[in-house]
Image (cartoon, rainbow, N blue to C red):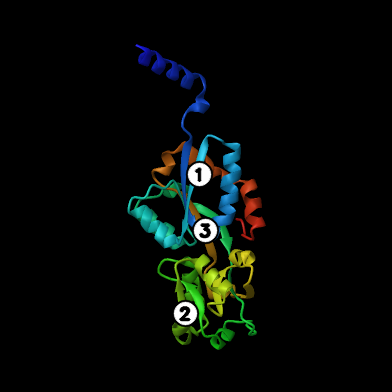
Amino acid sequence: MKGAVLVGFLCICLAAFPGMVAAGEIKLFAAASLKEVLNELADGYARKNSSVKIVRNYGASGALAKQIENGAPADIFISANLEWMAYLRDKKLIDASLMGAFTYNTLVFAGSTERKIASMQDLLKLERIAIGSPKSVPAGDYAMYALQKAGIDQQMRKKLVMARDVRECLMYAERGEVDGAFVYKTDALLAKQAKPFFTVPQELYPRITYPMALTVSGSKNRDAAAFHLYLQSGDARAVLEKYGFAPK
């Protein structure tokens, strides 16, 4: 009897105080290069929406897309290129009607070597260059595209050190384990030891676009849909600009 009374009391409390209900959860999968800016956006949003918990998973866009394909629960996916978003769209795993550009970036070459490096041709002087694995890391794919367009990809192949994501490229450059690395402008701004040597000419590679979409399951999550809208707001654009991203 006492147990029944206690259950009834708890039900009344939950009805009277909705805030006592378990927090809503948003599962965010995003490119590694967005970690700092999305952490600030997510933390700021959570402070204003205390009933929401945002679980974040950062990594190479290709690896994240494969995780989602293999059944990993995700509500929002932000890729560092259009190809991996298209991959999930073709698999019917994202809500294509809600897909759009989140932000943009620029490719730079950064390192800590004392050599004078000011152009793509100067890379031929170097011995070891970090690049994200082009098969899964968009930054590496953009870099390979630029090397090919510059006509030096064959001479560079034996010099390339493959990394799991763009942040690992930056780590190699920071530690001096390579002469330099292809990273995003926003990554170079976070570096403590490495410095940007030059910006890769835009005509050598496609514009770096970060597409964003709700997954099919995420489109049914009210909290995820609300956060998705917030990421397109003026407040979010201001934070993106602070970290060196180019908003829409």
How many other residues sit within 10 Å of disc 2, few (<14), some (14-19) or many (≥20)? some
Q: Residue beneath label 3, please?
A: 210
Amino acid at dot 1: Ile
Residue 50 placement (x, y as % from top left): 56, 35
Q: Amino acid at mark 3?
A: Tyr
The three-letter code of the residue at mark 2 reads: Leu
**In the depicted structure, whether residue 107 falls above or below residue 73:** below
Q: Which residue is mark 1?
A: 54
Residue 25 versus residue 104 in the image, above or below: above
Quick one: SS at disc 1? Answer: strand
Please provide percent x and percent y for residue 96. Answer: 42, 50
Q: CA distance from mark 1 to mark 3?
A: 20 Å
Residue farthest top in this picture: 1
State which tag comes first along the sequence, 3 or 2: 2
Query: In screen coordinates, is 149 left or right of 91?
Result: right
The residue where tag 2 is placed is 160
Query: Which is in the foreground here, disc 1 or disc 3?
Result: 1
Identify the mark nearer the N-term, 1 or 3: 1
- Please identify the quarter of the rendering in which residue 230 is found: top right
Residue drawn at x 47%, y 79% as measured from the top left: 160
Query: For mark 1, does the 10 Å Cα neighbourhood hold few (<14), some (14 to 19), or many (20 or more) residues?
Result: some
Element at label 2: strand
Compute the Cα span from label 3 to label 2. Answer: 25 Å
- Tell me the quadrant of the picture where the N terminus can be found: top left
